Amino acid sequence: MERTIVHMILHFLVPFMVAKTAWKENWLFPFIIMALTIAVDFDHLLADPIFDPNRCGLGFHPLHSWPAIAVYLVAIFSCRLRIVALGLLIHMGLDGTDCLWIR
């Protein structure tokens, strides 16, 4: 349970730290956009059970799939999509650390 709580906190703390570091005085908008990428977790609603703390989401959920991650990597090169893509890649990285715990 503690691991899940820390995981959720990191989904907001890491984008906050990245936004404060990369955008200095103008950090709020990038932080909000990156924090909103938590919405990618709606694909968990397609899983049964919806939440399983011992499941690696990478490669399991559609928006956490390797092809989706490849799209996020390509999107980082678009000026218009860069902040969203960065938020999604941070999200995937954090979810990837969860996979290390269960293996």
Image (cartoon, helix red, strand yellow):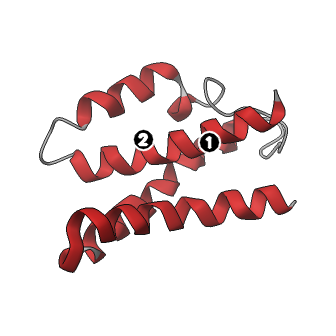
In the image shown, does 66 or 43 lie closer to the viewer? 66
* Left/right of residue 60 with respect to residue 16 in the rendered view: right
Query: In the picture, residue 76 is in which quadrant?
Result: top left
User: Disc 1 residue type?
Assistant: Asp
Q: Which numbered disc covers residue 95? A: 1
Q: Which residue lies furthest to the bottom in this view?
A: 25
User: Disc 2 residue type?
Assistant: Leu
Q: Crowdedness of circle 2 by 10 Å Cα count: few (<14), some, many (20+)?
A: many
Horizontal and vertical percent for residue 21? 30, 66
In the image shown, does 16 or 87 lie closer to the viewer? 16
The residue beneath circle 2 is 89
Vertical side of 46 occupied by 71: above or below = above
Q: Is mark 1 on a helix, strand or loop?
A: helix
Q: Which residue lies furthest to the front in this view?
A: 21
Vertical side of 66 occupied by 100: above or below = below
Disc on the earlier residue, 1 or 2: 2
Q: Which numbered disc covers residue 68? A: none
Gap in angstroms between the C-alphas marked 1 and 2 = 10 Å
Q: Is mark 2 on a helix, strand or loop?
A: helix
* Left/right of residue 23 with respect to residue 100 in the rendered view: left
Vertical side of 28 occupied by 59: above or below = above
Q: In which quarter of the image is the N terminus?
A: bottom right
* Left/right of residue 58 with respect to residue 21 in the rendered view: right
Q: Which residue lies furthest to the left in this view?
A: 79
Circle count: 2
Horizontal and vertical percent for residue 97? 65, 40
Horizontal and vertical percent for residue 24? 22, 74
Q: Quadrant of the C terminus?
A: top right
In the image shown, does 12 or 101 lie closer to the viewer? 101
